[in-house]
């Protein structure tokens, strides 16, 4: 086999759901992964030529589901529990030679996804493209909300709560992380990233230069001195016109067409090691537009192929 067929044969996709909403202000994010599974995401991707199957659906324990009003310390415990399980699921997929596509859930799951990738790569350095309206680089000392979905990047860079650091702490080096599309953040988290020297492509730069040019430069950064790179996409990085099924709606965001084109730059790259898409809320979706966006993002990143409607 050659071309796309050869690539796909090496990309047996492990769809891993992380049905956690405890890290966010919108608990409904926990409904995103089961909804995508029930809508037939694996079947959709199969029509694009990907061999994809669900290998795990990480969910909060029954205790947490039966006690919806918990103190913040208990929320942190639950988030750590889910991320620990997710970390193991990602490691198992990589050990089996499968490509992890992690579907959230709120963005706190990035601790488990990329902590798992770091372990799967035996702590070899890897890069990460982070598409998001927000920076998600708070610690308890800087967060205005105490929501863990605003903390995963800080943890991955080695800053944060001990229970979180035990899962993903220090998985990333600052010089190997790039943000794309940031346009809503607080001074404390921004100061941490500035001090660490993390490259941030703000949304105004994306508009000025074009997303394709930005992604090209970001790829050079995340692949410099690394053995692999991953992509995490928070759906609130998109303009709500293209992704209505989200909680934190920030206007003037990434647009569907340009994002699919830009992801074509990473399609079929052998050093792409994992993909994560988070914060889908099916209850807020309109005509399955956001669910179809998730499908098309995966296909664009992995096979650079259009998906039949």
Image: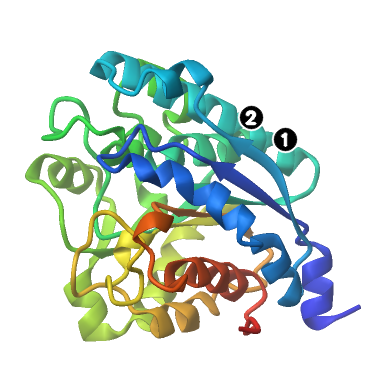
Q: Residues within 10 Å of mark 1 (few under 14, many from 20)?
A: some
Discs 2, 1 touching: Cβ within 8 Å: yes
Residue at 23% over, 82% down: 207
222 or 57: nearer the eye? 57
Instruction: Tell me the quarter of the picture where residue 196 sits.
Output: top left
Residue at 53% over, 55% down: 230
Residue on which disc 1 sits: 92
Residue on which disc 2 sits: 88
Is residue 43 rendered to the left or right of residue 249? right
Image height of 240 relative to 67, above or below = below
198 or 107: nearer the eye? 107
Asked if residue 31 can be seen in this view, the reply is yes
Is residue 30 rendered to the left or right of residue 40? left
The residues bearing labels 2 and 1 have C-alpha atoms spaced at a distance of 6 Å
Image height of 117 relative to 177, above or below = above
Which secondary structure lies at badge 1?
helix
**Number of marks in the image?**
2
* Residue 95 percent location from the top left of the image: 76, 38
Which secondary structure lies at badge 2?
helix
* Residue 54 percent location from the top left of the image: 71, 48
* Residue 162 percent location from the top left of the image: 36, 16
Is residue 102 rendered to the left or right of residue 164? right
Asked if residue 179 can be seen in this view, the reply is no
**Residue 11: image tag:** none
Is residue 264 rendered to the left or right of residue 257? right
Q: Residues within 10 Å of mark 2 (few under 14, many from 20)?
A: some
Q: Quadrant of the N terminus?
A: bottom right
Residue at 44% over, 41% down: 30
Image height of 31 relative to 141, above or below = below
Q: Quadrant of the C terminus?
A: bottom right
Residue at 33% over, 21% down: 75
């Amino acid at each position: 086999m050659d071309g796309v067929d050869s690539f796909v044969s090496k990309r047996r996709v492990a769809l891993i759901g992380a049905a956690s909403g405890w890290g966010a202000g919108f608990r409904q994010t926990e409904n995103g992964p089961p909804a995508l599974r029930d809508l037939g995401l694996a079947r959709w991707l199969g029509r694009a030529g990907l061999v994809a199957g669900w290998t795990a659906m990480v969910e909060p324990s029954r205790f947490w589901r039966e006690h919806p009003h918990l103190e913040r310390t208990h929320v942190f415990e639950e988030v750590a529990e889910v991320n620990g399980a997710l970390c193991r699921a990602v490691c198992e997929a990589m050990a089996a030679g499968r490509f992890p596509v992690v579907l959230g859930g709120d963005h706190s799951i990035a601790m488990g996804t990329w902590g798992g990738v770091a372990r799967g790569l035996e702590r070899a350095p890897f890069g990460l493209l982070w598409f998001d309206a927000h920076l998600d680089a708070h610690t308890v000392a800087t967060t205005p909300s105490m929501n863990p979905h605003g903390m995963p990047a800080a943890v991955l860079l080695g800053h944060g709560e001990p229970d979180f650091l035990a899962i993903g702490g220090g998985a990333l080096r600052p010089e190997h992380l790039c943000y794309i599309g940031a346009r809503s953040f607080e001074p404390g988290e921004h100061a941490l990233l500035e001090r660490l020297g993390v490259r941030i492509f703000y949304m105004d730069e994306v508009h000025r230069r074009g997303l394709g040019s930005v992604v090209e430069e970001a790829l050079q950064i995340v692949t410099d001195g690394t053995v692999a790179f991953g992509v995490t996409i928070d759906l609130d990085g998109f303009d709500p016109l293209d992704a209505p099924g989200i909680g934190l709606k920030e206007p003037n965001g990434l647009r569907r067409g340009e994002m699919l084109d830009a992801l074509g730059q990473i399609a079929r790259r052998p050093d792409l090691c994992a993909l994560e898409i988070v914060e889908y809320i099916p209850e807020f979706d309109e005509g399955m537009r956001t669910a179809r966006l998730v499908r098309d993002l995966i296909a664009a990143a992995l096979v650079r192929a259009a998906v039949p409607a």
